[in-house]
Amino acid sequence: LNGYANYFTKKSFWRNSANINVGWIKFDDKDNPDDDDSFREAADVVNLTSLYGYKFSEKLAASVLGEYRSTLLSNFNNPGYLDLGAGATWTPVNNLVIVVHPLNYNFVFSNTDFNYESSLGAKIVADYTKEIIKGVNWKSNLSTFLSYKDSDLSNWTWVNGFGFSVWKGIGVGLELGLRKNKQEALALNLEDNPLQTYYVIGLSYNVGTK
C-alpha cells in the first residue's frame, strides 16, 4: 500500500506519504520431513513521512521533516526509527524533491538486549515520481541518515516502485527495497553489515483524487 496526501499554496507545501509492504510466503520442501510448511513472513516494512516547507522561491524552501520506519508483522517499534529535523528542500523540477536537513535527530526505539543508539546527524531524502511512458509509472525514494557521532549509527533505505497500468487503474505493480543499517546488523551478530532486500510483484489498483 502506497498512499500520498499533499497540500500546496503559493508560499508553502505539506507532503505526506505512507509505504506499507507486508507479505507471506508458503514453501513446502517435500524432501525434508522437518521443513516448516506454514506461512512465513517475506516482507515487513512500514514507512511514514511528513514534510512541511515554507517557500523562499518556487524551487527552494525552509522545511521540517518527520519520518518513521519500523515493521508491522513482528517486533513493531523494536527497533523503530524516528527522524525529526530541519533544513531546506529543493525542487529543481516538478517530479523531484530533495531534502537536506543538517540538523536532524535520529531516535531509535528498542527493548532488546542490544544497545541501539540515537544520535544527531544529517538527513538527506530524494524522492522522484515520473510517468516514464503512458501507463508506466516509476517512483524512487532514497532516505539517508548520516550520524555525526559514529558512522556505525548511519543508515540508508532506497525503494523503487513501478506501476504498469492495464485497464481503468488496474495493472501490475513491482516494488524493490534496499537497506543498509549497521546497528541492525550488529544486533543480529552480522559483522559484515549485509544488504537487506525485499521485492514484491502482483496486481495493483490505482486510486487518485485532487
Image (cartoon, helix red, strand yellow):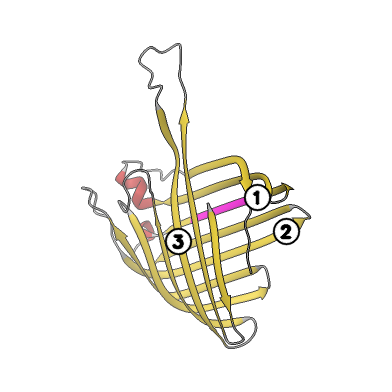
Do the residues under discs 2 and 1 have CB atoms within 8 angstroms? no
Decide: few, some or many residues near mark 1? Use Cα within 10 Å; few <14, some 14-19, many ≥20: many
Magenta stretch, main secondary structure, is: strand
Question: Mark 1 or mark 3, which has the lower sequence index?
Answer: 3
Crowd around label 2: few <14 · some 14–19 · many ≥20 (10 Å): some
Residue denoted by label 1: 162
Q: Position of residue 14 (x, y in %)?
A: 52, 75
Q: CA distance from mark 2 to mark 1?
A: 10 Å
Give whichever of discs 2 and 3 has the lower sequence position: 3
Residue 101 vs 134, above or below: the answer is below
**Residue type, label 2:** Glu
Decide which of 133, 81 is in the foreground and name it.
Answer: 133
The disc labelled 3 sits on which kind of residue?
Leu
Q: Earlier in the sequence, mark 2 or mark 1?
A: 2
Mark 3 closeness class: few <14, some 14–19, many ≥20 residues within 10 Å? some
Q: Is residue 83 left or right of residue 21?
A: left
Residue type for callout 1: Phe
Residue 47 locus on image (x, y percent): 45, 57
User: What residue is pinned by disc 2?
Assistant: 131
Direction from residue 96 to residue 131 in the image, left or right: right
Up-down relation of residue 26 to residue 110 (above or below): above
For the record, the magenta segment spans 157-161
